[in-house]
């Protein structure tokens, strides 16, 4: 009888310990897939007949999200921009964009802001890349980068 009780106590301790370990791992995964305090560089965009490298031959657009102010900012490959967003779970909506007014050629900036305006969801792929979606269709994909120097 004592051996059975001891075995149950040991089993219970192992199970409780395992649950705590899982919760810690879930927090790690969640922080890995957090949009905030990260510079996200565009590596795929839909909505253009021009190839990605043709849209962005010199530099790629990037975006940074600021959590405490619900603001986003970045470089469209031509102009610096900023705006506000609203996010709830995996839904996201971008407010009006404020940008500098440098003349841009090639259609990359126009395509970037057009797709940003169509975005209503976000997700992460298996590699931790940020996907901006229209409903369930990925229209933009970003990778984490160190803050650009341009």
Image (cartoon, grey):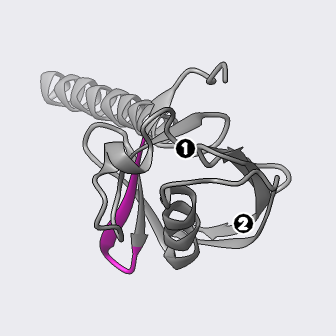
Give the quarter of the image for residue 13. Answer: top left
Q: Residue at x 57, y 46 (%)?
A: 35
Instruction: Provide the residue designation for mark 1.
Output: 61
As for residue 136 lying within the magenta part, the answer is yes
**Residue 71 in view:** no
Judging from the image, what secondary structure is the residue with disc 1 in? loop
The circle drawn on residue 6 is: none
Question: Marks 2/1: CA distance?
Answer: 18 Å
Mark 1 or mark 2, which is nearer the start of the sequence? 1
| Image side of residue 132 versus residue 68, left or right | left
As for residue 103 lying within the magenta part, the answer is no
**Residue 88 in view:** yes
Q: Closer to us: mark 2 or mark 1?
A: 1
**Image position of 62 with respect to 114: above or below:** above
Instruction: Provide the residue designation for mark 2.
Output: 85
Name the spot of residue 137 as percent of width and height, x first: 30, 73
Q: Residue at x 41, y 39 (%)?
A: 26
The residue sitting at the right extreme is: 69
- Pointer 2 local density, CA inside 10 Å: few below 14, some 14–19, many at least 20: some
**Image position of 124 with respect to 28: above or below:** below
Which quarter of the image is occupied by the N terminus?
A: top left
Q: Residue at x 63, y 23 (%)?
A: 147
Name the spot of residue 105 as percent of width and height, x first: 56, 54
Residues in magenta, as a range: 134-142
């Amino acid at each position: 009888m004592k051996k059975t009780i001891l075995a149950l106590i040991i089993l219970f301790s192992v199970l409780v310990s395992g649950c705590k370990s899982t919760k810690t791992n879930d927090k790690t995964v969640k922080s890995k897939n957090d949009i905030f305090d990260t510079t996200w560089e565009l590596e795929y965009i839909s909505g253009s007949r021009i190839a990605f490298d043709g849209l962005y031959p010199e530099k790629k657009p990037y975006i940074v999200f600021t959590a405490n102010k619900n603001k986003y900012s970045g470089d469209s490959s031509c102009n610096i921009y900023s705006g506000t967003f609203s996010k709830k779970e995996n839904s996201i909506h971008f407010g009006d964009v404020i940008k500098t007014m440098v003349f841009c050629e090639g259609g990359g900036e126009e395509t970037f802001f057009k797709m940003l305006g169509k975005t209503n969801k976000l997700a992460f792929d298996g590699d931790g890349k940020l996907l901006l979606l229209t409903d369930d269709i990925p229209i933009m994909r970003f990778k984490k980068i160190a803050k650009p120097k341009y």
